Image: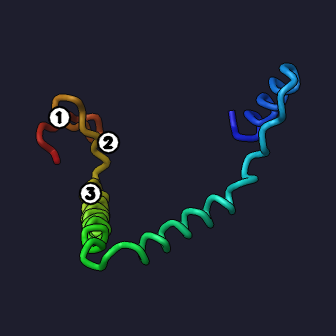
Amino acid sequence: MNAGQQHLLDTYRAAQRGEAAPPAPGTHTVRTAREIQQWYRFRAVVTAPADRLPSRLPSRLRRAVRSAAACLLRRGATERVDGAAEGVDGAAEGVDGVVRSGAM
C-alpha cells in the first residue's frame, strides 16, 4: 500500500467516525525540512566549537567506511568473473554445475 492509498483509507475511516480528515501526504514535507535545517543552524550557533568536534568525526568515519565498502564491492564484482554462487557450506557451484570447495 502506498502513501496515497493509505491516505484514502484514513480519510474514509475519519469520515465514518465523524473526525477531521488527515492531511494529504507531503503536505508538511517542506515545513519539516525547513525546521530541521533551522534546528541544525541553531545548534551550530549555540554549541561551543570544542563540543562540535565529535559531531564531525562520525561523518568522516562514515565517509571512510562508505569508500572502503565501495572498494570492496568493486573488487568483489571483478573477482566473480566465473559466475560462481557460494552455497551454505562454503562450497561454490560454478556456471558449469561443478562444485568447488573454497572457490572464493
Cα separation, mark 3 vs mark 1, equals 17 Å
Q: Residues within 10 Å of mark 1 (few under 14, many from 20)?
A: some
- CA neighbours of label 2 inside 10 A, class few (<14), some (14 to 19), many (20+): few
Residue identifier under label 1: 91
Q: From where the camera sits, is residue 60 visible?
A: yes
Q: Is residue 36 left or right of residue 64?
A: right
Q: At 36% across and 72% down in the image, what residue appears?
A: 47
Q: Position of residue 92 (x, y in %)?
A: 21, 38
1 vs 2, front mark: 1
Q: Position of residue 44 (x, y in %)?
A: 42, 75
- Mark 2 → mark 3, Cα distance in angstroms: 17 Å
Rendering quarter of residue 96: top left
Q: Nearer the viewer, residue 87 or 32?
A: 32
Q: Return the mark for residue 13.
A: none
Identity of the amino acid at label 1? Ala
Residue drawn where x is 16% and y is 35% of the image = 90
User: The residue tagged with tag 1: helix, strand or loop?
Assistant: strand
Q: Alpha-carbon distance for marks 1 and 2?
A: 13 Å
Q: Amino acid at mark 3?
A: Gly
Residue ranking furthest to the left: 102
Question: Mark 3 or mark 1, which has the lower sequence index?
Answer: 3
For the point 68% across and 32% down, the residue is 1
Q: Which residue is mark 3?
A: 76
Q: Position of residue 87 (x, y in %)?
A: 24, 32
Tag 3, which secondary structure? helix
Residue 67: image location, x then y, percent: 29, 68
Q: Nearer the viewer, residue 29 or 75?
A: 29
Do we see residue 67 in this rendering? no
Question: What amino acid does circle 2 point to?
Answer: Val
Q: Which residue is mark 2?
A: 95
